[in-house]
Image (spheres, rainbow, N blue to C red):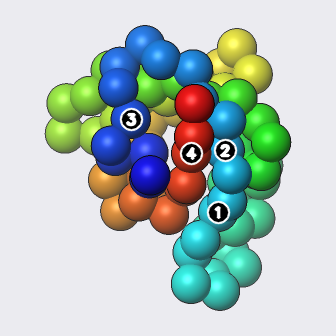
Amino acid sequence: MNLNEAELGTDYVITKIDTGGDEEIESFLFSLGCYSGESITVVDRKKNLVVSIKDARYNIDPELAASIQVEK
């Protein structure tokens, strides 16, 4: 499932980043610590998603969240 489908407050593991080959976005996500095998949690959901990665919080738009595949 992608990050948009994740439940609030549940820890997930990133299984894949699928940006359609956009290296700039992949590099941006990597700089946030968002890569395969890393733990991620959706903390809040309003217009965008607030996620926690490595004890830091980031605001991610739904388009970007759709490219992040996760599993419990």
Residue 57 makes an appearance in the image: no
SS class, disc 1: strand
Looking at the picture, does residue 20 appear above or below residue 42? below
Residue of label 1: 17
Label whose residue precedes the other's in the sequence (3 or 2): 3
Secondary structure of the residue carrying numbered label 2: strand
The residue shown at (32%, 53%) is 62
On residue 6, the disc is 3
Q: Are marks 4 and 3 in contact (CB under 8 Å)?
A: yes
- The single residue placed furthest to the left in the displayed view is 47
Mark toward the start of the polypeptide (4 vs 1) = 1
**Mark 4 and mark 1: span between their CA atoms?**
9 Å
Give the numbered dot on residue 70: 4
Residue type at numbered disc 2: Ile
Upstream in sequence: badge 4 or badge 3: 3
User: Alpha-carbon distance for marks 4 and 2?
Assistant: 4 Å
Label 1, residues with CA under 10 Å away: few <14, some 14-19, many ≥20: many
Residue at the disc numbered 2: 14
